[in-house]
Image (cartoon, helix red, strand yellow):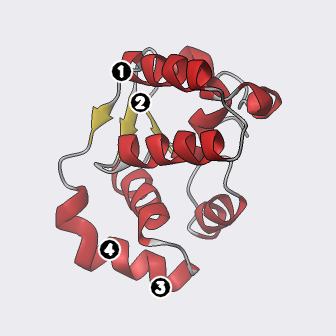
């Protein structure tokens, strides 16, 4: 099965104190079928930097997380930028989402695959749009 993976869903894999929030079955999906918008790695690295700045990750933890992130195989959608001023923008406005989160929603809708996220607003928007959610 393919899934669209939001940056928030991968956080428990990379940050130990979020481990309890791992979506059931997500670890299995990380080896096949993960699709992400073009900004995904930057968003995940920003999440790690924020965790480090808040003292949630040591330098060693951050280095380990970056190594783990580099080992995760994802398919990067090549049309994310093309959809930015159309469908993605409309979804951001319609659901009061950031353009980054709307890109996940647009991708899941376009590919008709489940969305894996820990972001409540993004999941609510997926529900409103009638999209399947991974692990639920």
- Disc 2 crowd rating (10 Å Cα; few below 14, some 14-19, many 20+) is many
Mark 2 or mark 3, which is nearer the start of the sequence?
A: 2
- Residue at 39 percent across and 61 percent down: it is 103
- Residue at 53 percent across and 23 percent down: it is 65
Q: Which residue is under mark 1?
A: 73
Name the quadrant containing residue 28.
top right
For residue 87, the mark is 4
Q: Which residue is under mark 2?
A: 34
Mark 3 or mark 4, which is nearer the start of the sequence?
A: 4
The answer, for residue 116, to whether it is visible in the render is: no
Q: CA distance from mark 1 to mark 4?
A: 26 Å
Name the quadrant containing residue 9.
top right
Mark 4 or mark 1, which is nearer the start of the sequence?
A: 1
Residue 59, x across and y down, in percent: 57, 25
22 relative to 117, above or below: above
Closer-to-camera residue (33/98): 98
Q: Which residue is under mark 3?
A: 93
The answer, for residue 43, to whether it is visible in the render is: yes
Residue, far right: 20
Q: CA distance from mark 3 to mark 2?
A: 26 Å
- Residue at 45 percent across and 66 percent down: it is 102
Q: CA distance from mark 1 to mark 2?
A: 7 Å
Mark 3 or mark 1, which is nearer the start of the sequence?
A: 1
Mark 2 or mark 4, which is nearer the start of the sequence?
A: 2
Secondary structure category for the residue under label 3: helix
**Which image quarter holds the C terminus?**
top right
- Disc 4 crowd rating (10 Å Cα; few below 14, some 14-19, many 20+) is some
Residue 117, x across and y down, in percent: 61, 46
Q: CA distance from mark 1 to mark 3?
A: 31 Å
Left/right of residue 3 with respect to residue 90 in the rendered view:
right
86 relative to 44, above or below: below
Secondary structure category for the residue under label 2: strand
């Amino acid at each position: 099965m393919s899934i669209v993976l939001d940056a928030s869903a991968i956080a428990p894999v990379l940050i130990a104190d979020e481990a309890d929030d791992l979506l059931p079955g997500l670890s299995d999906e990380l080896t096949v079928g993960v699709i992400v918008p073009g900004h995904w790695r930057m968003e995940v690295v920003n999440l790690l930097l924020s965790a480090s700045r808040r003292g949630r990750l040591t330098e060693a933890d951050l280095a380990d997380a970056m190594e783990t992130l580099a080992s995760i195989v994802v398919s990067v959608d090549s049309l994310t930028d093309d959809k930015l001023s159309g469908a993605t923008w409309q979804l951001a406005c319609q659901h009061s989402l950031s353009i980054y989160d709307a890109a996940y929603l647009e991708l899941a809708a376009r590919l008709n695959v489940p969305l894996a996220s820990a972001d409540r607003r993004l999941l609510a928007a997926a529900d409103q749009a009638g999209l399947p959610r991974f692990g639920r």
